[in-house]
Image (spheres, rainbow, N blue to C red):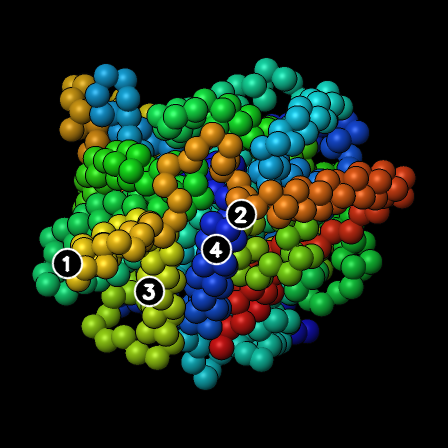
Amino acid sequence: MIPALEIRDLHYSYPDGAPALGGISFSLAAGERVGLIGPNGAGKSTLLLHLNGLLPDHPGHCPSVRVDGLAVQSPHLPEIRRRVGLLFQDANDQLFCPTVYEDVAFGPQQLGLDDAQVRTRVTQALAQVALSGFEARLTHHLSSGEKRRVCLAGVLACRPSILALDEPTSSLDPRGRRELMAFLRGIALTQLIATHDLELVADLCSRVMVLSQGVIVADGPMNAVLNDEALMAAHGLERPHILRHLHPHSPVGP
Amino acid sequence: MHIPDGFFDAKVALATGALAVVGLGAALRHARLRLPARRVPLLGLSAAFVFAAQMLNFPVAGGTSGHLIGGVLAAVLLGPSAAVIAISAVLIVQCFLFADGGITALGGNIFNMALIGGAGGWAIFHLFRRAAGGTLGLVLAAGLAAWGSTVLAAIACAGELAASGTIAWSRAFPAMVGVHVLIGVGESIITVLVLLAIAKVRPDLLGLAGPQRRGMEVMAPSSLDYASSRLGGEKAGTLLIFGLLISLGLALFVAPFACPWPDGLDKTAAVLGFKHRESPTRALPAPICDYKMPGISSEGVATGIAGAAGTVIVFGLAWMLTRALFCKSDVEPLVDAAASSP
Amino acid sequence: MHADFLDRYSRLESPMHRLDAAGKLVLALALVVLTVALPPSRAIVLAAVAVLLLMVLVLSRLPWRFILRRMLWLEPFVLGAALLTLLEPGGWRIFLLLTARCSLCLLTMLLLANTTPFADLLRVLRRWHLPALMLTTLALMYRYLFVLVDETGRMRRARASRTFAARRWLAWRASAGVIGHLFIRASERAGRIYSAMCARGWQ
């Protein structure tokens, strides 16, 4: 079974020379939902940018990242970028077209689909995020929850196999957050969720990785990692409330 | 300095329109060939930035306030071509979304504010920049360029108004230039302050040495063709085009009024004994009399153009009614592969 | 500031709004050219243009107070420059005609702007083969205009809440600082937008 995502000994330094990621290795099986947690500055966003080749700027010869077995380097990059649906932290950065239709259609158009196919993809994607009928809406008029969902639709319209999400619930109100979590629970794609929202991780993810100072310091089942108070405290995290106030045998998690 | 419709006559509108099209075209071509793909969004964001920056108040006296125009600021931050594109985008949006600046005057406004204000301002900046180095040198050069380009644009504007026959040169020049000599001071101070603020946090955006920032937002000197010591090839060609266009515009609209040679010729004629000949009149008509309106001087041509426009309107109304009956919607991408990355 | 300061009325429902954007643009241009090119002897046609524009205003169901306010906001320059013509002998005729022409053109463009979403105008310009780089710049500018204006507002309020003296020089320093930071943020955002575009396959 080819893993959906495989990373082997990934290193990265910032342009000014400071080390960002030091020797990251892990793999994701198809359909897994994994939480990536860690303190600010750990390198979570930087790691996600490696998944579709946005980093490093100058790729070397030995690819450390493989998606569905394909190496993340040219000439595979267009296909990689279709398969890896990256959701950025600030929805405004990702929603760069004036209308909703144009933005969701951007991906399919770049893939070279014809107008009819693009239209189908857009309609289906908007339906998936419960925003049917929003095609003509102006992007700068949307609420932050709606913007987030349009970004998701834009990514889904490319039919990815992996979703990589960077702080998906930041700046969402409680309802927006619930809707997003319900959505993530419902789709069958492989998911890597980088987040500070530990309650979400406890609720959705079967496996958790802790990234601290550019290194993976823990990688295991959600219950084991999140309940390890010492580990959590050592890396500026804490045991989520949902786990603290439950009977150890009551079901929680995905 | 946004001129509305009706102030420029047809010949000035067409002439400035041609200058603007060529200038903007040269800037776009330069950007298409030399702007790295990762900078393409910066053009749009810079245009939005200039627009937003123009909304800030700088209190002057008793309730009045000044605003940044931003030509030289954009030029220092982005380079001449990108500045021309960004400022033109601002003018186009202001014209179409806010009716700020007439559509027939768009060519003139782009020539004055984007070409003279942006590219011309950059040239003045570059000239002074070579004299002094470091942050202070850069900032002072920008301040001088801001004042100079504002005044120069005002002169060109006065010339365009006078050449249109709208306002006589003897009135337009003192009014426009007098006001803009003062506005230029404000523009200069604001430009200096803004550049100092940027230099403190992100000196690399100005091409100055300073602490690098981490993260993927790091960009090398963000200007498209920042003031390097050597001009060569493509960039020199584009700058030459800007220079030619500005000179041409000034020659067309300003020189006839500012040029002393008609009077000089008169004096010479008197000295040489040809005084009995009629003294040469000024190159363009003096203050307008009763029935000579700003517009097109030839009645026949004016009627012709108005008639053509009227015909277009009638046909257009009929066509639109027909179209309205048969609904058609096709959506095309707006943000697409713009720059062909090398 | 409300998100709709840019496009408050361009998506209303009315016969004018439903018309094709290209047609409206061409008509508006033709009207402006007509108004500007009209020889003074035919000035009476301007009255017909005014009537036509008022009909369009009614059909478009735009609030007339809003249009009036917008026109009054733009008039000062028109009046100021036009006042110079009064200095000529018999200049009052020129002044009146100039003001009439300007105002009609203003009204035309305002009606166009408020019955046609800017995105539609851009699509028309694309069909007319405006250079792609210029279109992308206009589209991105329009998209992020509100975002930047919003950021400006927030930075201004943050500074104002820490400003105690009303000295003019400090106000200048503060506003200039806001502009400086605005550019830095815009520049960094442009980099992120580039990454987002690449992430969805932009070549």
Q: Is residue C74 above or below residue A85?
A: above
1 or 4: tag closer to the N-terminus: 4
Q: Are marks 4 and 2 in contact (CB under 8 Å)?
A: no
Of badges 3 and 1, the one in the foreground is 1
To which residue does mark 1 refer?
A: B271
The percent coordinates of residue A92 (x first, y second) are 52, 44
Q: Amino acid at mark 1?
A: Val
Q: What amino acid is found at the position of numbered circle 4 in the picture?
A: Ala
Mark pair 3, 1: CA separation: 38 Å
The residue tagged 3 is B243
- Nearer to us of marks 3 and 2 is 2
Residue C150: quarter of image: top left
Q: Earlier in the sequence, mark 4 or mark 2?
A: 2
Amino acid bearing label 3: Gly
From the top left corner, tell me how far across and down residue B178 is, in percent.
23, 35
Please state which of the two labelled residues, at mark 1 or mark 4, is closer to the viewer: 1
Looking at the rendered structure, the kind of residue marked 2 is: Ala
Q: Quadrant of the C terminus of chain C?
A: bottom right
Q: Label 3 vs label 4: CA separation? A: 16 Å
- SS under mark 4: helix
**What residue is pinned by disc 4?**
B15
Which residue: 27% across, 75% down? B231
Asked whether the viewer can see residue C91, the reply is yes
